[in-house]
Amino acid sequence: MGSIDTPTITENGSTQSQAAAPSGGDHKPPASANGAQVEVLPEPEATKKRRSSMLPLEVGTRVMCRWRDGKYHPVKVIERRKMPYAVPYDYEYYVHYTEFNRRLDEWVKLEQLDLDSVETVVDEKVEDKVTSLKMTRHQKRKIDETHVEVGHEELDAASLREHEEFTKVKNIATIELGRYEIETWYFSPFPPEYNDSLKLYFCEFCLNFMKRKEQLQRHMRKCDLKHPPGDEIYRSGTLSMFEVDGKKNKVYGQNLCYLAKLFLDHKTLYYDVDLFLFYVLCECDDRGCHMVGYFSKEKHSEESYNLACILTLPPYQRKGYGKFLIAFSYELSKKEGKVGTPERPLSDLGLLSYRGYWTRVLLDILKKHKGNISIKELSDMTAIKAEDILTTLQSLELIQYRKGQHVICADPKVLDRHLKAAGRGGLEVDVSKLIWTPYKEQS
């Protein structure tokens, strides 16, 4: 799936983006080759009538839209709303950029749309059937592989359609958390009283959220927390990890889920946080411990899940924190004396991170190990579930099936090539700084 660079998140509460192209839906400015201005002729009456006849645009309409990079991209109209005190056809449109992930969906104004590119609204079921007839089975499989919404593999078509319908429009556009103003990615089911709020203000320590900046400022004068409400189980330099029990800190756990859902396109949001432990990673300074990300895990998992949900907040992404969180979850599994695996389905970013982690850990061992080694031995050494080891090595074509058993083929040059492709391992967990005992239900 393609991607567009998201706007830069700045510490002064603003976002940087490139200058927009001229409005009005025209692809070229009215200038001649030598730079002289050209007289703009009035729009023909027939064109005016045709445009007015198609307004307001129907939900489902496909059209070209000018994005913040100044270029036009194909979009589909997901929703529309009439502007207050506006002329009859003055609507805003919520659009999905069909080339890219849903996290870039947004409200746009009419002048950003090129009405000359409007396509007739077609019933989606008919459109899919016609498209399928035009494609070979190989072409359809290629498109399905490219456009699958990773993280929804376990949903059937009806459930996926219901999920997308319910969460199709982002309800909160931006949040303020500590020093950062952050553009959100997805819908999150905040309580009904926040339905009219495009921006929310979070206390970065207790995660209470408010509608107005003044409310946050009053709250900060009273809030005595300077770190997540839980036990600090790891401290190395300026990094700290806190374990928060959802049963003891129910409001914090629920607020963390509301916050995380703004950046994770998962179907399920757990309100019963009693069953979960939250591991919150912080950067610490003289002002306190500031959350950069977290992962959660069930207190008791019959499926050997060592991680239920994982998120690195956008201002802290691409700094190795996601890899650190994954590695940390496996260090906890080692302390428990168990193998672990993340809960399915994984988000798109989560899946990429895990594949990279498994590849680096396994190939590092294979590179150093002399003699034969079994998948069971690899699992015992790493706490990675045998099935995850098998699929990872198969994807790298490092495993063969001979005489009824799997055999690992580890050529040093091939290992080096795969390790290079997997990228850097990110921040390392210093196990000597981890002070933790596995969770036990108190009687």
Image (tube, helix red, strand yellow):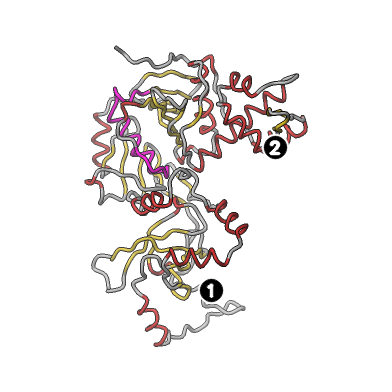
In terms of depth relative to the viewer, which is nearer, 169 or 366?
366
| Number of numbered tags placed on the structure image | 2
> In this rendering, is residue 59 above or below 420?
below
* View extreme (left): residue: 193
Q: Nearer the viewer, mark 2 or mark 1?
A: 2
| Highlighted range, magenta | 244-269
Q: Is residue 265 magenta?
A: yes
* View extreme (bottom): residue: 45
**Which residue bears the numbered disc 2?**
397
Helix, strand or loop at disc 2?
loop
In terms of depth relative to the viewer, which is nearer, 227 or 48?
48
Residue 50 x %, y %: 39, 82
Counting residues from the start of the chain, the first of labels 2 and 1 encountered is: 1
Residue 77 x %, y %: 40, 63
**Which residue bears the numbered disc 1?**
28
Is residue 250 shown left or right of residue 128? Answer: left
Is residue 360 shown left or right of residue 75? Answer: right
What residue is drawn where x is 44% and y is 58%?
A: 96
Q: Is residue 199 magenta?
A: no
**CA separation in Å, label 2 and label 1:** 50 Å
> In this rendering, is residue 411 above or below 43?
above
In terms of image quadrants, where is residue 254?
top left
Near mark 2 (Cα within 10 A), the count class, few <14, some 14-19 or many ≥20, is few
> In this rendering, is residue 77 above or below 341?
below
> In this rendering, is residue 350 above or below 16?
above
* View extreme (top): residue: 443
Helix, strand or loop at disc 1?
loop
